[in-house]
Protein backbone atom coordinates (compact mmCIF):
# COMPACT_ATOMS: atom_id res chain seq x y z
CA UNK A 1 0.00 0.00 0.00
CA UNK A 2 1.48 3.35 -1.00
CA UNK A 3 0.56 6.45 0.89
CA UNK A 4 1.79 10.01 0.96
CA UNK A 5 3.58 10.26 4.27
CA UNK A 6 4.38 13.78 5.42
CA UNK A 7 7.62 14.41 7.32
CA UNK A 8 7.75 12.89 10.79
CA UNK A 9 6.82 15.47 13.42
CA UNK A 10 9.33 16.84 15.90
CA UNK A 11 8.93 15.87 19.56
CA UNK A 12 6.90 18.39 21.54
CA UNK A 13 8.97 17.66 24.67
CA UNK A 14 12.55 17.94 23.35
CA UNK A 15 12.28 19.09 19.71
CA UNK A 16 14.08 16.10 18.14
CA UNK A 17 12.63 14.26 15.13
CA UNK A 18 10.41 11.30 16.06
CA UNK A 19 10.35 7.79 14.57
CA UNK A 20 7.30 6.09 13.08
CA UNK A 21 6.60 2.95 15.11
CA UNK A 22 3.13 1.95 13.89
CA UNK A 23 0.66 2.76 11.14
CA UNK A 24 -2.82 1.23 11.03
CA UNK A 25 -6.22 1.86 9.52
CA UNK A 26 -8.37 4.31 11.44
CA UNK A 27 -11.14 2.37 13.24
CA UNK A 28 -13.94 4.57 11.84
CA UNK A 29 -12.66 5.79 8.47
CA UNK A 30 -11.41 3.24 5.92
CA UNK A 31 -9.49 5.78 3.85
CA UNK A 32 -7.54 7.18 6.82
CA UNK A 33 -4.39 5.92 8.55
CA UNK A 34 -3.50 6.52 12.19
CA UNK A 35 0.27 6.83 12.66
CA UNK A 36 2.10 6.61 15.99
CA UNK A 37 5.50 8.25 16.53
CA UNK A 38 7.95 7.84 19.42
CA UNK A 39 10.95 9.97 20.38
CA UNK A 40 14.19 8.82 21.96
CA UNK A 41 13.25 10.82 25.08
CA UNK A 42 10.20 8.55 25.54
CA UNK A 43 7.44 10.92 24.44
CA UNK A 44 4.93 9.71 21.84
CA UNK A 45 2.41 11.32 19.55
CA UNK A 46 0.03 10.27 16.80
CA UNK A 47 -1.68 11.77 13.78
CA UNK A 48 -4.23 10.82 11.15
CA UNK A 49 -3.51 11.08 7.42
CA UNK A 50 -5.52 10.26 4.32
CA UNK A 51 -4.48 7.37 2.12
CA UNK A 52 -3.67 8.66 -1.35
CA UNK A 53 -3.82 5.33 -3.17
CA UNK A 54 -5.85 2.23 -2.54
CA UNK A 55 -5.57 -1.23 -3.95
CA UNK A 56 -8.62 -2.08 -6.01
CA UNK A 57 -11.01 -4.51 -4.39
CA UNK A 58 -10.97 -7.82 -6.20
CA UNK A 59 -14.40 -8.39 -7.65
CA UNK A 60 -15.88 -11.85 -7.67
CA UNK A 61 -16.80 -13.25 -11.06
CA UNK A 62 -20.47 -12.74 -11.75
CA UNK A 63 -22.18 -14.77 -14.45
CA UNK A 64 -25.66 -14.10 -15.70
CA UNK A 65 -27.86 -16.45 -17.67
CA UNK A 66 -29.40 -15.14 -20.84
CA UNK A 67 -33.07 -15.99 -21.15
CA UNK A 68 -33.90 -18.22 -24.08
CA UNK A 69 -30.36 -19.49 -24.46
Image: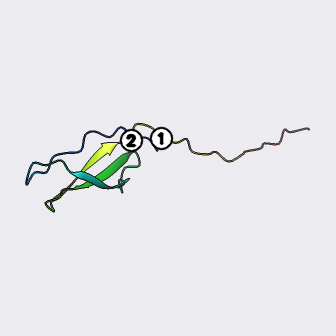
Quadrant, the C terminus: top right
Mark 1: give few (<14), some (14-19) or many (20+) Cα within 10 Å. few
Residue drawn at the location 72% of the way across and 45% of the way down: 61
Q: Quadrant of residue 43?
A: bottom left
Most foreground residue, 50 or 36? 36
Residue for badge 1: 54
| Marks 1 and 2 close (CB-CB < 8 Å) | yes
User: Residue 2, relative to residue 28: is it above or below?
Assistant: above
- Residue 44 coordinates in the image, percent (x, y): 18, 58
Residue for badge 2: 51
- Residue 58 coordinates in the image, percent (x, y): 61, 45
Mark 2: give few (<14), some (14-19) or many (20+) Cα within 10 Å. some
Left or right of 39 in this view: 22: right
Looking at the picture, the colour scheme in use is: rainbow
Most foreground residue, 21 or 56? 21
Residue extending furthest toward the right: 69
Kindly report the distance in space between the C-alpha atoms of the residues bearing marks 1 and 2.
7 Å
- Residue 34 coordinates in the image, percent (x, y): 31, 52
- Residue 67 coordinates in the image, percent (x, y): 86, 39
Residue extending furthest toward the bottom: 42
- The kind of secondary structure element at disc 2 is loop
- The kind of secondary structure element at disc 1 is loop
Residue drawn at the location 13% of the way across and 51% of the way down: 11
Q: Looking at the rendered structure, which numbered label has been put on residue 6?
A: none
Residue drawn at the location 35% of the way across and 37% of the way down: 4
Residue drawn at the location 52% of the way across and 42% of the way down: 55
The number of numbered badges drawn on the structure is 2
Amino acid sequence: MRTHTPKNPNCEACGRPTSLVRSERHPKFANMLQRVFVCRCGASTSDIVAETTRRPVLATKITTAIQGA
